[in-house]
């Protein structure tokens, strides 16, 4: 703690001389003082804030802080050189820095560094240790005891150690811009991002009897290089560039001990192993241009070819040494290769002044050149051979879109737009090889008076798949005899027939300069055509049936005086989903399959989010500037599930379909501040913040009891209360001093 405090004071000591020196330099040159500022202060925290939600994506420490700083130096070295420096949340875990320097109209160098935290849990526990990156071991005495007496697990968990489940992202970037003439621009950019930490990761061994939630080690490196040039004049312009990305995962494999077994046997593994995200590269070229042609017409085009590669070595089928007859891998590595080609063409014309036209064509081709491998068998959950031949499939697709819209300005400042769009999707190794979607729409922009604005739009789309056939290429010799396979009337929502309605509207009224009111509304309603299965002899489809959302917002501002302003707003978001499926039992040696429509079930889900916000800003005789802000966000979720069949019919299975308890969360924020501007650019400031987060979730009410140990098998372990994100309430009091120069 003392070292951290000393470091903060050293940083402030380094920044402050630059602040005062910048003012002196400007003054010595006989010019007006450059604009800049620095704000430092002391912060005190109160309340219950141990929840990971409090510092989920931020860092609010107690004690000394540097809120922000900025230095602007212009017209240096003969009025040709400039320098700018900015910092935010200085020397905190979510800090950000930006420096810019260069020669006016010639060179510019931007240097940026950002740090972003992500806290998942502050209370997770585990008895695993990590002797080397990605390898987790459990103490031998503990494994020996749990293999013979798994019921002792609850007592052993009391001695588990705390885990730091959080990530930290550090990203540095530099951009050099060279402008040889007013028409030309050349840019070189490099960035490097490092992400380290741990997050929850679910694993399983031995036919799902040993489910273990492990800390996944994150140690990523991402480097990007971008080179480009631009040229433009009144007749047109062009762009050319290259973007390259290299990703490396420093911990590519996860290995863990099974606490419930010390030695390998056929059907029971003492360890588990998984391959994590592989190293990969991506390269893109960007060629774009625009040209003005006769009759008030402009043509714009861009072509972006890309190449992606990944050749990570395959792991062996299993880490369990006791399984006999494990086959050899079909290859040592994937040899993954994908080539993409994105093309965009836009033609705009005002040849007919009353009706401007726009024609667009877009194409994106994702060509997957990865080899398709045949796996004669595989090992299921490190326990036993699956007994099924599988094939890997190189999924690819080609998407084309053609659109035309026309705008008619029927009266000054008011117009109507009409559009048509056609989209074709060609897929490889999917259930639908080709689908077409047609969209028609209209939009109105009405501004009959300066104080009144009304905008509204409507789009209607119909997606029609040519033929839907469950893709079973992944099982070239068929699925096991005891498997039911995919439900043939199941429809994946990204391929299924769909009718979409989308509406948006905006109203703005400003009857007085001191008052304004705005209201907006939007809805998207997706209906997945149930009749699309009728030609197969099914009464209805299964999967997602409806996806409907609404949102509307009201806001107003009131500014009766230059020293006082008030605003308020309210937003409601509503999401509704409906899906249908079937509970089935595969055949056995003694009984046929139970695959009956009487075992269908349906689930209806609703998410509702309400957000209120209000605030005011003002000043008192220029001696005090005050601000007050309050917001409240409330989210609720309900899931209603019911059986569609009759329990009186023999073979009825859906006995557990029921309504789930509702879940909700609520977040309050109150911010009040007052600042006292003084002479010499000094402004003391007092700020108070109150935050409160509450949640009600039936899945987490008893998380410490049932997530620590799975009572159904007594051989599954989760990261204790780490899955829980409890509520919190916090009071934040800060006193700061801002100096502007």
Image (cartoon, rainbow, N blue to C red):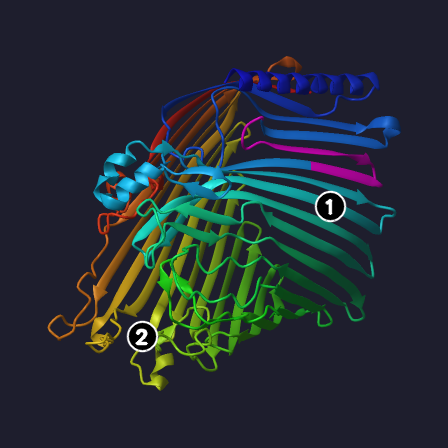
Residue 198 part of the magenta segment: no
Point out the residue furthest to the left here. 648
Residue lying at the far top in this picture: please name it. 679
| Residue situated in front as seen by the camera: 90 or 252 | 252
146 in relation to 740, above or below: below
Nearer the observer, 699 or 737: 699
**Number of other residues with Cα within 10 Å of mark 2, as a class: few under 14, some 14 to 19, many 20 or more:** some
Residue 566 location, x and y as percent?
A: 47, 34
Along the line of sight, the residue nearer the viewer: 11 or 519: 11
Q: Is residue 576 left or right of residue 224?
A: left
Circle 1 residue: 189
Q: Residue 38: horizontal and vertical position, in percent?
A: 63, 22
Considering depth in this image, is 648 or 496 the residue closer to the camera? Answer: 648
Q: Which residues are magenta?
A: 91-111
Q: Taking 641 as reference, is 119 above or below it?
A: above
Q: Position of residue 693 (x, y in %)?
A: 35, 36
**Residue 394's image quarter?**
bottom right
Q: Determine the image quadrant of residue 536.
A: bottom left
Residue under label 2 = 484
The secondary structure that most of the magenta stretch takes on is: strand
- Element at badge 1? strand
630, above or below 147, in the image: above
Q: Secondary structure at mark 2?
A: loop
């Amino acid at each position: 703690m003392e070292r951290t405090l000393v470091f903060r004071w050293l940083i402030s000591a380094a920044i402050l001389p630059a602040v005062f020196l910048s003012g002196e330099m400007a003054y010595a040159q006989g010019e007006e003082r450059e604009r800049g500022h620095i704000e430092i202060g002391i912060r005190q925290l109160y309340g219950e804030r141990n929840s990971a939600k409090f510092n989920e994506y931020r860092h609010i420490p107690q004690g000394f802080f540097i809120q922000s700083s900025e230095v602007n130096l212009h017209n240096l070295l003969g009025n040709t050189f400039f320098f700018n420096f900015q910092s935010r949340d200085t020397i905190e875990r979510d800090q950000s820095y930006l420096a810019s320097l260069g020669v006016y109209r010639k060179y510019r160098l931007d240097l940026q560094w950002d740090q972003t935290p992500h806290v998942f849990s502050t209370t997770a526990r585990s008895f695993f240790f990590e002797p080397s990156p990605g390898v987790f071991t459990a103490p031998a005495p503990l494994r020996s005891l749990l293999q013979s007496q798994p019921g002792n697990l609850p007592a052993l968990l009391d001695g588990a150690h705390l885990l730091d489940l959080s990530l930290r992202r550090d990203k540095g970037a530099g951009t050099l811009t060279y402008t040889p003439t007013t028409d030309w621009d050349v840019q070189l950019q490099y960035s490097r991002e490092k992400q380290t930490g741990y997050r929850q990761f679910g694993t399983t061994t031995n036919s799902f009897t040993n489910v273990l939630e492990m800390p996944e080690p994150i140690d990523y490196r991402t480097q990007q290089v971008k080179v480009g040039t631009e040229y433009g004049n009144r007749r047109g312009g062009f762009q050319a560039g290259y973007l390259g990305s290299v990703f490396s995962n420093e911990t590519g494999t996860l290995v863990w001990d099974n606490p419930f077994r010390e030695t390998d046997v056929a059907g029971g593994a003492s360890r588990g192993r998984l391959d994590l995200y592989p190293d990969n590269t991506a390269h893109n070229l960007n060629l774009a241009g625009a040209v003005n042609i006769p009759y008030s017409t402009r043509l714009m085009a861009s072509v972006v070819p890309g190449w992606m590669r990944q050749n990570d070595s395959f792991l062996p089928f299993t880490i369990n040494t006791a399984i006999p007859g494990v086959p050899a891998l079909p290859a040592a590595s994937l040899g993954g290769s994908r080539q993409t080609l994105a093309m965009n063409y836009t033609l705009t014309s005002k040849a007919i002044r009353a009706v401007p036209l726009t024609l667009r064509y877009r194409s994106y081709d994702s060509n997957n050149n990865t080899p398709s491998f045949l796996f004669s068998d595989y090992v299921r959950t490190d326990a036993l051979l699956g007994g099924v031949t599988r094939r890997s499939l190189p999924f690819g697709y080609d998407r084309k879109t053609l659109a035309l819209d026309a705008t008619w300005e029927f009266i000054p400042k008011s117009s109507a737009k009409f559009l048509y769009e056609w989209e074709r999707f060609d897929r490889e190794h999917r259930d639908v090889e080709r689908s077409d979607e047609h969209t028609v729409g209209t939009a109105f922009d009405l501004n009959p008076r300066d104080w009144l604005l009304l905008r509204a739009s409507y789009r209607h789309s119909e997606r029609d798949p040519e033929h839907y056939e469950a893709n079973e290429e992944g099982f070239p010799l068929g699925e096991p005899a005891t498997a039911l396979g995919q439900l043939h009337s199941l429809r994946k929502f990204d391929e299924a027939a769909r009718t979409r309605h989308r509406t948006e509207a905006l109203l703005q009224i400003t009857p007085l300069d001191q008052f304004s009111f705005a209201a907006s509304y939007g809805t998207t309603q997706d209906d997945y055509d149930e009749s699309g299965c009728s030609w197969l002899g099914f009464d209805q489809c299964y999967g997602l049936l409806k996806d409907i959302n609404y949102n509307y917002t009201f806001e107003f501002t009131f500014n009766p005086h230059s020293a006082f302003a008030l605003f308020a707003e309210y937003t409601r978001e509503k999401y509704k989903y409906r899906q249908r499926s079937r509970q089935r039992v595969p055949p056995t040696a003694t009984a046929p399959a139970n695959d009956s429509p009487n075992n269908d079930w349906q689930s209806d889900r609703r998410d509702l989010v309400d957000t209120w916000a209000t605030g005011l800003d003002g000043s008192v005789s220029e001696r005090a500037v005050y601000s007050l802000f309050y917001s409240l966000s409330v989210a609720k979720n309900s899931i209603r599930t019911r059986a569609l069949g009759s329990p009186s019919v023999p073979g009825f299975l859906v006995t557990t379909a029921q309504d789930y308890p509702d879940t909700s969360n609520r977040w309050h924020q109150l911010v009040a501040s007052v600042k006292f501007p003084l002479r010499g650019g000094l402004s003391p400031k007092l700020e108070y913040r109150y935050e409160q987060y509450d949640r009600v979730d039936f899945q987490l009410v008893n998380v410490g009891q049932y997530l620590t140990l799975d009572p159904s098998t007594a051989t599954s372990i989760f990261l204790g209360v780490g899955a829980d994100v409890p509520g919190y309430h916090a009071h934040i009091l800060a006193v700061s001093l801002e100096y502007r120069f």
